[in-house]
Structure formats: C-alpha cells, structure tokens
Amino acid sequence: MMTNEDQFQLATYKKMPIAAVHGSGVWICASDGESYLDLYGGHAVAGTGHCHPHVVEAIQKQAEKLLFYSNLVYSSARARAAEKLVSIAPHPLTKTFFCNSGTEANENAMRMARMATGREQIITFSGGFHGRTADAISATFLGKYRELGKPNVPGHLEAEFGDIESVRALADNTVAAIMLEPIQSMAGVRMAGPEFYVALRKLCDERGIVLIYDEVQTGVGRTGQWFFAASDAGGGVVPDVVTLAKSLGSGVPVGACLVTDAIASHIKENDLGTTFGGGMLAMAAVTATIEAIEQDRMLENVRRVEAYLRGRLQEVKRVVAVHGLGFLLGIEFKENASIVHKAMLDRKIITGTSSNPKVLRLLPPLCLDEQEADMFVAAAKFPE
Ligand SMILES: Cc1ncc(COP(=O)(O)O)c(C=O)c1O
C-alpha cells in the first residue's frame, strides 16, 4: 500500500490501509475502488463534507485571481472572511487573528493572554490536547505528549478537568490564562457540567485571568451550534479568546483566534504575525465554509442527526454510553474500541479511537444524514 510514501516519509503516523483518491460529502473513494463512510471527517477537518461544491468553487475562483499576498496589503477576501467569522461569533468576540493551524492559534492565544495581563503562567488541564509546537505541547497534559516537547516551556500548571477547586488552588496573581478544550476530544470526549464553565468564568473575572477556549475541534458547527462558547451545555459562558482550526477552511490549512475588544486593546503592531496567516486562498475557504454551513442548514442537521443516532445506539448492546455533543461523539463500548475500530474498517467505515481504550470517536462531516448514521448502527452490531 503506497510503499513510496512509507519509503520517503517519516514513519510518524499509524495509517489505515486506505489510499484516498476522491471524496464527496461523508464519503471517501479509495484507489482500489472501494467507498468508505468517513465518520472521522478527515481528522475533524471536513466539516462541510469532502469537496463541498460551494467551497471548491470559491477556492477555484480565488486561485485564478490571486493565491497569496501577506497582511502587508489589504484584501477583500480577507476582509470578507474576518467579517463573516466575527458575524457568527458570540458577543463580545469581535476581532480575529488568522494563522495556519490549531497549535499556532493556541500559541498566539497564550501569548496574547500574557501580553494582556503582564503575567506568565498558564493553567491547562489533565487530558487536554493543544498541539505540538513548544508552548502548546507544554500546555498539553494528555498522555506522553508533554514529554515529547522537552525541555518544556516554563510556567505551565496542570489542573483537573471538571474540578474547580483544583483550578482555584492554582489561580493566583501570576496566572495569565486558563485554557481548555471545553470538550476534551482525544481524552475520550470528556465534558464537564455547565456549572464548571460558569465557575471558570467567574474565577477568571475575579482574578483578572484570561479564559481561552481551544475550539479547534468543537468550533465551526461541530457541536450543533457555531461554537461551544455561549452554548447551553457550557452554561452560556463566553471566553475571552476562542481558538479555531481543523474544519475552519474545509481542508485548506487555516487557524484563527477570536478575541474580545478588551484583549485586542493590548495587542500592537508586530506583536503577532505569520507569513501565511490570512492568505487569500485560505480566506476564500473560510468564507465559503461558513456560507456552506448556513446554506445547507448544517447546524440543524447536526442536532437532528445526533438525537437520532443517540436513540438508535440504544439498540446496540455493546454500547455502554455516548459522550459528547453534536458530531463530536465518544461511543463507549464494552470491548476495546480498537476492536470496534477494526470491525468498522472491515465494513468500510472510518472512525477514530481516543486515549480512553473503551471510547471510539466520531467526528463526521456536519452533513451526515440518518441513513448514513444507520450504517454505523448496523455495523456496530457485528457479532460478539
Ligand atoms: C483540541 C485541539 N487543539 C489543538 C490541536 C492542534 O491543531 P493542529 O494539528 O492544527 O496544530 C488539535 C489537533 O488535533 C486539537 O484537537
């Protein structure tokens, strides 16, 4: 299988035995002619589905006009994307900074928090994942990742997810930010009750700490609303900074920080920057991604199909619990999720595992429908 790739690429990824050739919606076609139902959404990136026609057309049109110019010039493509992104963001998130990936968005979010507060320490949580660049990996207390980033950036503190007292104990006047994945995805799709997020907001307000939501996975519609920020599940809390990437460009690499005016007021010319951030091709993809989600009413679809899938999964005896929200679901099985993952792949369904050995992760495109959800349910009934 694609031996050239194995020969010439570092062996850093455990690959499935699939060579993806083309995709449409929730489906991927492989070089052997087989079709796969992609419930992993191309690593949570294909929010609008693979090759959504509106996104493809927007990228094609932009590519013919201008592929790239940096932030040293104005661009209507960039202006449109920034305005569109702010228009779907909860108040008072009013400004964007564009970059290229999730880890970079988190690095910039932490940097802004340090600039805004004049403090250095950052509290993050056991089980959280924030990326692999130096500061982000130092903020990642999931499994072995932090070790991979040694020597770590100093000033990172670990609290227990869902345990406000553990945060309170660390949150003194040296702390610049509390950053969290509001739903911890890789840890097995762990969510806290709304009271936890409300208490975090209150603590940050009392102690002058910046609250950062890493919505690299939960953002851009995945939970059935645009963001976890301001959601009922999150007690209506809006953080000071939201970071985004993954599905923001439907597959064109792009990351972003959404920030309040209060944070923005501390950021001056040349404080942050990146060559490729805000490039025209990525900006066309961002605008078209949001438009496609709106036009196809995908948020409603996520909520409806999530409820349907949860209902149908009650028929599956080996399912112990369904964690998460919208299309970020952790299905807890009686047996090891790697067995289910393999059984699914044998039935041409792509799913994801997590660091919880019992939890299979689903991050499908937001256009997954009931019939496609039924295919997963039928496959999950494979013989003991
Ligand atoms: C919650 C979260 N934050 C940050 C990242 C890092 O994003 P990227 O791989 O684009 O750097 C990821 C990637 O999986 C993620 O899931």
Image (cartoon, rainbow, N blue to C red):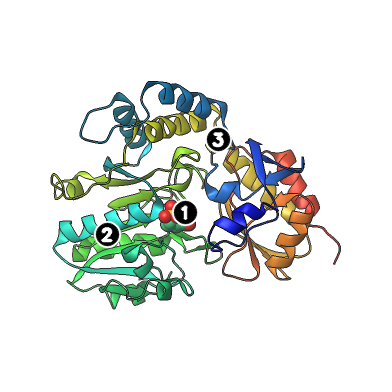
Tell whether 270 sits left or right of 356: left
In the depicted structure, whether residue 232 falls above or below residue 151? above
Counting other residues with Cα less than 10 Å from the Cα at mark 1, is it few (<14), some (14-19), or many (20 or more)?
some
Instruction: Determine which of the numbered discs, if any, sits on residue 298 in the image.
Output: 3
Q: Quadrant of residue 382?
A: bottom right
Residue at 30% over, 41% down: 91
Amino acid type of disc 2?
Answer: Met
The mark tally for this picture is 3
Counting other residues with Cα less than 10 Å from the Cα at mark 2, is it few (<14), some (14-19), or many (20 or more)?
many
Q: Are marks 1 and 2 in contact (CB under 8 Å)?
A: no
Give the CA distance from mark 1 to mark 2: 25 Å
Amino acid type of disc 3?
Answer: Met
Q: Does any portion of residue 238 appear in the rendered image?
A: no
Q: Nearer the viewer, residue 353 or 384?
A: 353
Instruction: Determine which of the numbered discs, if any, sits on residue 110 in the image.
Output: 2
Counting other residues with Cα less than 10 Å from the Cα at mark 3, is it few (<14), some (14-19), or many (20 or more)?
many
Q: Quadrant of residue 322?
A: bottom right
Q: Residue 375 at x, y = what percent?
A: 77, 46
Q: Quadrant of the C terminus?
A: bottom right
Instruction: Determine which of the numbered discs, if any, sits on residue 233 in the image.
Output: 1
Residue at 73% over, 55% down: 313
In the depicted structure, whether residue 353 falls above or below residue 93? below
Q: Residue 120 at x, y = what percent?
A: 20, 68
Q: Residue 14 at x, y = what percent?
A: 61, 62
Q: Looking at the image, in which quadrant does ligand 1 appear?
A: bottom left
